[in-house]
Amino acid sequence: MEPEFNPYLRSSPPPSVHVGGKGYIEVPGKAENLRWQTRSAAPTEYENALANALEQAYASGDTTADEIVETLNRRNFKSASGERWTVANLASEMSALGR
């Protein structure tokens, strides 16, 4: 079974030289294509549920943060801390998950 995250991913930012093999995991043309190359861990149950809820919001036509927050709250999908969504905590959560 292939891993769902990259166990070799460095936690520090990459060096400024963008050349394969110099501080990077891959060497051009010789890299194994890992499915979750940029993840340091497999997605949690909460992250998967949030992704599903966001997909449903977009599928229903939501395009703004206000609309997404309204949909998440209407569907009673709580934040990781168990709170109702606000534009601010949605932006904070997306920023944290995008790291």
Image (cartoon, grey):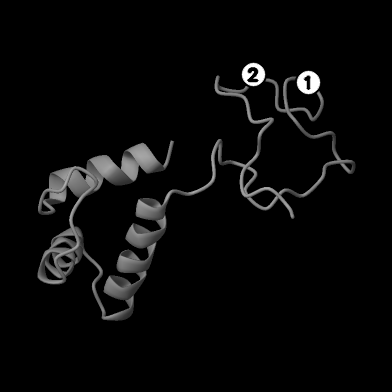
* Total count of labels: 2
Decide: is 5 above or below 47.
above
Question: Mark 2 is on which residue type?
Answer: Pro
Q: Splitting the image into 4 quarters, where does residue 37 fall? A: top right
Residue at far bottom of view: 60
Query: Any mark on residue 72, and which?
Result: none
**Which percent across, then down, holds residue 20?**
79, 30
Whole-percent x, y for residue 31 in the image: 83, 42
Which percent across, then down, holds residue 74?
Answer: 10, 71
Q: Quadrant of the C terminus?
A: top left
Residues at marks 2 and 1, CA–CA distance in whole angstroms: 8 Å
Q: Position of residue 27 (x, y in %)?
A: 84, 34
Q: Residue at x 31, y 73 (%)?
A: 58
Q: Residue at position x 43%, y 48% from top?
A: 44
**Few, some or many residues within 10 Å of mark 1 (<14, 14–19, 20+):** few
Please tell me the numbered disc located at residue 15. 2
Label 2 CA crowd tier, 10 Å (few <14, some 14–19, many 20+) = few
Circle 1 is placed at which residue position?
22
Q: Residue at x 34, y 37 (%)?
A: 96
Give the structural element (helix, strand or loop) at label 1.
Answer: loop
Residue at the image point whose x is 13% and y is 53% from the top: 85
Tell me the quadrant of the picture where the N terminus can be found: bottom right
Q: Are marks 2 and 1 in contact (CB under 8 Å)?
A: yes
Q: Is residue 43 above or below residue 27?
A: below
Determine whether 37 is above or below 10 in the image: below
In the structure shown, which secondary structural element does the residue marked by tag 2 occupy? loop
Task: First in sequence, mark 2 or 1: give its number.
Answer: 2
Question: Which kind of residue does numbered mark 1 sit on?
Answer: Lys
Q: Is residue 58 left or right of residue 12?
A: left
Depth check: 38 or 82 in front? 82
Q: Is residue 22 left or right of residue 63?
A: right
